[in-house]
Amino acid sequence: MKIPFIKMQGLGNDYIFLDFFNNSFPRIDFMKLANDISNRHFGVGADGLVLVMPTARFDVKMRMFNADGTEAEMCGNAIRCIAKYVYQHNIVRKSILKIDTLAGEIVAEILLDKKDIRIAVDMGKPIFSAKEIPVKIDRDTVINYPYYKYHINCVSVGNPHCVIFVDKITDDMVLKHGAKLEKADIFPKRINVEFARIINRDEIKMRVWERGTGETLSCGTGAVAVAASAYINNLVDKKVTVHLLGGVLEIEIMNNGNFRMIGPAEEVFYGEYLW
């Protein structure tokens, strides 16, 4: 079977996209396909698989699968990629796009400048309720809570995150402790883990261990989770620049309390995957 695809990346967080607007796909086990096509040695290589689909209620529907085949609620970097793709290819020629995800409606705005397109995404209000994230713990919120070797901050930005503020980020933290925390018993749906260092009140440096994938160069929802956790701990102001391994995202709190993420997205190449 030949499967046409587009590879895109947002700050190095790369995904394989299947365009359901312009292609007809047979019945496919997308969990298995995600696992196979994401393999960087035997597949195309990516952090996961994203389906770009028509929908009656919204401008576009997104389904997202991690590299291990598990389906996730949404992905901030993939949202920006989808918005740019459907806009540039005249699939949905709107400056404001409504995108259907398992986390609900996500609104993305196309920002045009002379050089390129950037995308602003309304990520909604972060959820700190332990029950809703979810975190199996006997308290309402998990803010600066001592657990394992750290003080953790848990938040949902459409998907679950565990944010840890440290003075210095090391490989051991991300690759060893991040992997262990992802599957800790208190996280029934597993969790994304971010290690962050506060540079000043408007800059943060972070690395992320993504649920179902491992360390990635960038995570849009993770950047929002870090900014939200830093703000609730009074470590930063309402506008913050987040430095990730793959580049920079701008995060700001809007007047209605929603968090807005601004960043780039790029097409890498097109191809056909033999499966």
Image (tube, grey):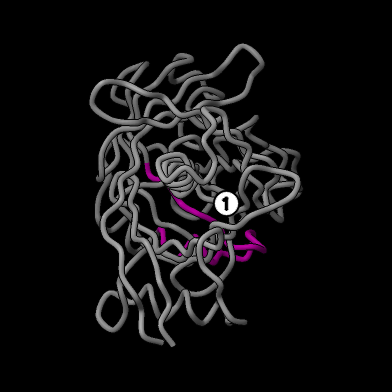
Viewer-closest of 27 and 39: 27
- Vertical arrangement, residue 191 with respect to residue 68, above or below: above
Identify the residue under disc 1: 74
Q: Is 58 displayed left or right of 238 in the figure?
A: right
Figure check: 224 above or below 184? above
Q: What segment carries the magenta color?
A: 178-195
Image location (x, y in percent) of residue 67? 43, 70
Instruction: Identify the residue at image location x=47%, y=47%.
Output: 82
Q: For the point 59% across and 66% down, which residue is it?
A: 71
Q: Is residue 202 above or below residue 137?
A: above
Judged from the image, the secondary structure of the residue bearing numbered disc 1 is loop
Residue 14 placement, left or right of 69:
left
Circle 1: residue type? Met
Q: Which residue sits furthest top?
A: 255
- Residue positioned 63% across, 40% down in the render: 142
| Rendering coords of residue 236 (x, y %) | 43, 18
